[in-house]
Image (tube, grey):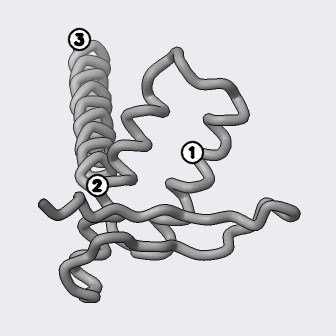
Amino acid sequence: MNPEPRCEAEFDADTGKFAEIRFFNLRSNEREEQEHIAATLVEQITKQLECSHGLTNKERRRLEKERRVLQKAFLQKTAIDKAIEAKQQKKVKAAEKKLQRLVRKAAKERAY
């Protein structure tokens, strides 16, 4: 039985700066597999950070730092980022429609 592939972002113990990303139990050394594993970890970290309890501020900062490093290293939007972007687009579109209604309403009032 093969263990699950995973990755870890390592930071320097003295400075706290990013050192390297290590991958374990990869079937191949292909970039696509690395991106998939990193994206899975980013989504997992995001879900942990969204939870309002269970983590100290120090743990939250470390997880946020790890997520940021993984996202920068692979420069790929995850499914969560795409969902957030879609949600923001919906809000913008709704605000646009609301402004159009207000403009039409103001124009009707001026007409009378």
Q: Tell which of 110 and 34 is nearer to you.
A: 34
Quarter-wise, where is residue 75 in the image?
A: bottom left
Q: Tell which of 4 and 15 is nearer to you.
A: 4
Q: Tell which of 111 and 66 is nearer to you.
A: 66
Of callouts 1 and 2, the N-terminal one: 2
Q: CA distance from mark 1 to mark 3?
A: 60 Å
Left or right, 7 with reference to 17: left
- State the residue position of label 3: 112
Q: Residue at x 35, y 64 (%)?
A: 38
- State the residue position of label 2: 40
Q: Secondary structure at mark 1?
A: helix
Instruction: Decide: is 28 above or below 69.
Output: below
Q: Secondary structure at mark 2?
A: helix
Q: Residue at x 76, y 67 (%)?
A: 12
- The tag on residue 63 is 1
Q: Tell which of 17 and 1 is nearer to you.
A: 1
Residue at the outermost left position: 1
Of circles 2 and 3, the one toward us is 2
Q: CA distance from mark 1 to mark 2?
A: 14 Å
